[in-house]
Image: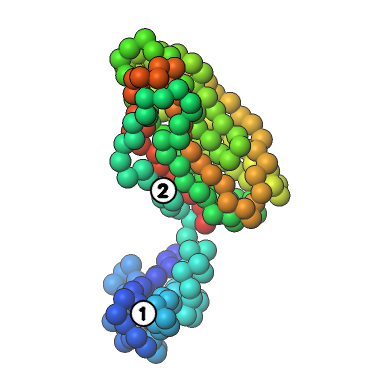
Amino acid sequence: MRKHKMIAVITAAAIAGAVAVPAIKDFTGRALAQTGSILTSVLGTDYVDVYRFGSAVVNSATWATVASYIRGTMLLYGLPGSVTAAASTPEQTLGSYVVPGGTLSQSAGNRIVVSARFKFAANSNVKTVKCYWGATSISSGTGAFNGNSATCRLEIAGVASGQQNVAASIFTDASATPIVMASSVATEYDAGNVTIKATATDASGTAKDTVLQDLWIEKVGS
């Protein structure tokens, strides 16, 4: 018989002490045996019991423990709105997120995926965009990219202590082939915070030629 893990969750908002739990059923509709309380709220912390066919796999587990049972994709960050580069020539950070230390684990086999989308003004001004994982970056190179859009993607995997493989690419809607595709080795400290960012450099100091339309960062795996 296939086993299906059942997870019951009740949030701790405005709840104090033990809470009675409604009947939990498996995928066939059969009620699962259970005793006691499934949630205890202590200073706003949620605790849950994880059940598999009536047997408690983890009693009073924290969210971190529950997450260890789940392998999927988690959105770490999403750009709240588009950002236009200022009329200035130095490289500008249009969007960024600091990945907390320990998020990427070589032993857990997880990954971090970064996606960014840019839009360029329809003119002949020279423009450049980059995406960064810490000190490692991929650049579009310089070009007018007249009225085009561009997408940047980074895939980061931990391969050893203090070492990550970074596969990166940048495409424009003007071509089915990438402007740049690269694979490199980064050496960010595993337990330290790592900054992910998307930047733009415009040769014109008077035009606002580049817009970061979106930036989203996902963690794949537990």
Element at label 1: loop
Residue beneath the point at 42% across and 81% down: 43
Q: Nearer the viewer, residue 120 or 29?
A: 120
Residue at the top extreme? 124
Above or below, 1 against 13 in this view is above
Residue drawn at (47%, 80%) of the image: 60
Residue type, mark 1 in image: Leu
Q: Badge 1: how crowded within 10 Å, few (<14), some, or many (20+)?
A: some
Q: Secondary structure at mark 2?
A: strand
Q: CA distance from mark 2 to mark 1?
A: 37 Å
Left or right of residue 148: residue 55: right
Expressed as whole percent of the image width and height from the top left, the position of residue 76 reads: 44, 51
**Which numbered dot is residue 150?**
none
Q: Residue furthest right?
A: 161
Q: Which residue is mark 2?
A: 77
At a point 62% along the width and 53% down the height, the residue shown is 192
Residues 102 and 88: in front is 88
When the figure is inspected, residue 115 is found, relative to residue 20, above or below; the finding is above
> Dot 2: few (<14), some (14–19), or many (≥20) neighbours within 10 Å?
some
Number of marks present in the image shown: 2
Across and down, in percent, residue 78 comes to 37, 45
Q: Looking at numbered disc 2 in the image, what kind of residue is underneath it? A: Tyr
Instruction: Provide the residue designation for mark 1.
Output: 32
Q: Is residue 74 above or below residue 31?
A: above
- Decide if residue 200 is on the left or right side of residue 155: left
Query: Which one is closest to the eye, mark 2 or mark 1?
Result: 2
Residue 25 falls in which quadrant of the image?
Answer: bottom left
Residue 100 in sight: yes
Residue found 60% across the figure and 34% down from its top: 136
Residue 214 percent location from the top left of the image: 35, 36
